[in-house]
Image (cartoon, helix red, strand yellow):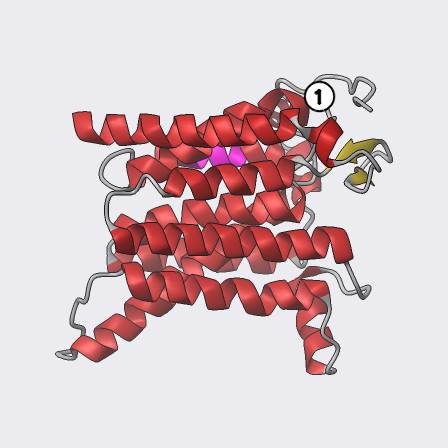
Amino acid sequence: MIRSLVLAGVGAAAGFGVARALTAARPLLDRAGRLDRPNHSGASVSLIEGPAVAAGLAVAALALPRPAHRFAAVTATAAAGVLGGIDDLMETGSAKGLRGHLSALARGEVTTGGLKVLGIPAASLLAAAVVREPRPLAGSAVFGRCVDTVLAGGVIAGSANLVNLLDLRPGRGLKAAGLVTVLGPLHGPAAVLSGGVLGTAAAVWGEDLAGRTMLGDTGANALGAALGTRTALQGSRGELLGVLSLLVALTLASEKVSFTRVIEATPVLRELDAWGRTPAAPAAP
């Protein structure tokens, strides 16, 4: 338990330090305002938070003791962040949502969103193949490994997508990630990623809630991938199946139902969603 707490502390410190340093360096990194984007209300906010969170999570993952775990966590979070960044900064096509991107790919149109649809699952499957211990299924070690890889990879990719779907208001993605973190395992190798998520979230919390910066696809995808990898590290086959089923159900529901409308129509969720949110102050030049 003590070792897990120490590892969680290292992950939290690494994530916090890197994320805070990058957000503080925004005036130097983005003098031309290339990272400024309108948010849901039309106000201009900075996307610097996304790269800061993705980098913080990747650095925090380096504190994982086992090389295979480090490789899987860094691969999943970095790939999700990079592909999210491409979509943030170089968005092409008008397709929206999973169905829209899949339809575009079926027409032979490769959009930046389509690259995410292809790339994040591919990186997630690679990470899952490396991190899962071989467990036979139906008397076959190969079959067991294939099933575990698909389940764990689906959890990583699905988590990356879900956090991105949720992050439509200041603080919402950070709150969802933080809640999942404290309710999940805080021991073993998962402790490092738990600490990394909480540390990076703490580093950008104030700016995000104030509406001065936002996760964007870069940060939201990386944050979700880190949470998914945490589950992949320690979840049983049954737990992976349950989590993946929930992720698939929520993703399909998002194609029909607005999460924002559901939150605003539910008093408890509405209060939690609005908690800590402050009026946006003028952004730093």
Closer to the camera in the image, 278 or 47: 47
Considering every residue shown, the one lying at the far left of the view is: 139
Q: Position of residue 257 (x, y in %)?
A: 67, 52
Q: The N terminus lies in which quarter of the figure?
A: top left
SS assignment for the magenta stretch, majority: helix
Q: Quadrant of residue 133 in the image?
A: bottom left
Q: Judge by depth and name the residue closer to the eye, 273 or 266.
A: 273
Q: Residue at x 66, y 51 (%)?
A: 85
Q: Position of residue 89 (x, y in %)?
A: 75, 52
Instruction: Check if residue 176 falls in the magenta segment.
Output: yes
Residue 26 seen in render: yes
Q: Which residue is mark 1?
A: 210
- x and y percent of residue 62 in the render? 36, 43
Q: Position of residue 47 (x, y in %)?
A: 71, 39
Relative placement, left or right, of 195 versus 84 is left
Q: Is residue 3 left or right of residue 160?
A: left
Q: Is residue 170 magenta?
A: no
Please state the extent of the stretch shown in magenta in the rendering. Answer: 175-180
Question: Looking at this rendering, what residue extends furthest in the front direction?
Answer: 28
Tell which residue pokes out farthest to the right in this image.
42
In the depicted structure, whether residue 112 falls above or below residue 48: below
Q: Is residue 28 above or below residue 121?
A: above
Q: Secondary structure at mark 1?
A: loop
Question: Seen in the image, is 3 located left or right of residue 18?
Answer: left
Mark 1: which amino acid? Ala
Residue at image point 82% right, 24% down: 285
Is residue 270 visible in the rendered structure shown here?
Answer: no
The image quadrant of residue 111 is bottom right
